[in-house]
């Protein structure tokens, strides 16, 4: 199954106006598809975003080492004071990174994002 990564990012931004960012990064942490919601400014510089993505990619690599016992990871969510970050592995080389406002309906955003990916 081939995914249209740009369209996935646009669709995720359309799920809820409190989604700030929807992007897909590769194993280097570089955002290859998607980006910030129009009119918003990123809290991180491009270099800091890549570093943050690279840390998320690394954590997913650590999770994979336990897959035989826990099953495949579906998503991870981290709540920060200023935003929430949701990461979803798409394949061995790409990670969907979604950031939202802290008060967003995360369950709805995650469930609808997972439905988009499965289509």
Image: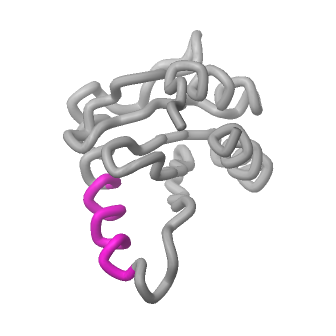
State which region is magenta: 56-66
| Residue at the image position 65 percent from the left and 33 percent from the top | 19
| Residue at the image position 54 percent from the left and 40 percent from the top | 98
| Residue at the image position 27 percent from the left and 54 percent from the top | 55
Q: Is residue 73 above or below residue 32?
A: below
Occupied quadrant, residue 64: bottom left
- In depth, the one of 104 and 72 nearer the eye is 72
Whether residue 50 sits left or right of residue 112 in the image: it is left
Occupied quadrant, residue 44: top left
Q: Is residue 46 magenta?
A: no
The quarter of the rendered structure image containing the N terminus is top right
In the image as oriented, which residue stretches furthest toward the top? 39
Q: Is residue 63 above or below residue 75?
A: below
| Residue at the image position 54 percent from the left and 50 percent from the top | 86
Position of residue 30 measured from the top left corner of the image (x, y, whole percent): 26, 31
Position of residue 83 measured from the top left corner of the image (x, y, whole percent): 54, 45
- In depth, the one of 23 and 42 nearer the eye is 23
């Amino acid at each position: 199954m081939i995914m249209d990564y740009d369209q996935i990012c646009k669709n995720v931004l359309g799920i809820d106006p409190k989604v700030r960012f929807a992007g897909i990064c590769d194993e280097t942490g570089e955002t290859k598809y998607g980006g910030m919601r129009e009119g918003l400014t990123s809290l991180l510089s491009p270099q800091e975003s890549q570093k943050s993505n690279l840390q998320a990619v690394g954590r997913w690599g650590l999770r994979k080492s336990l897959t035989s016992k826990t099953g495949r990871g579906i998503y991870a969510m981290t709540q920060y004071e200023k935003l929430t970050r949701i990461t979803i592995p798409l394949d061995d080389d790409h990670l969907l990174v979604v950031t939202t406002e802290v008060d967003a309906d995360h369950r709805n955003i995650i469930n609808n994002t997972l439905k988009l990916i499965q289509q």
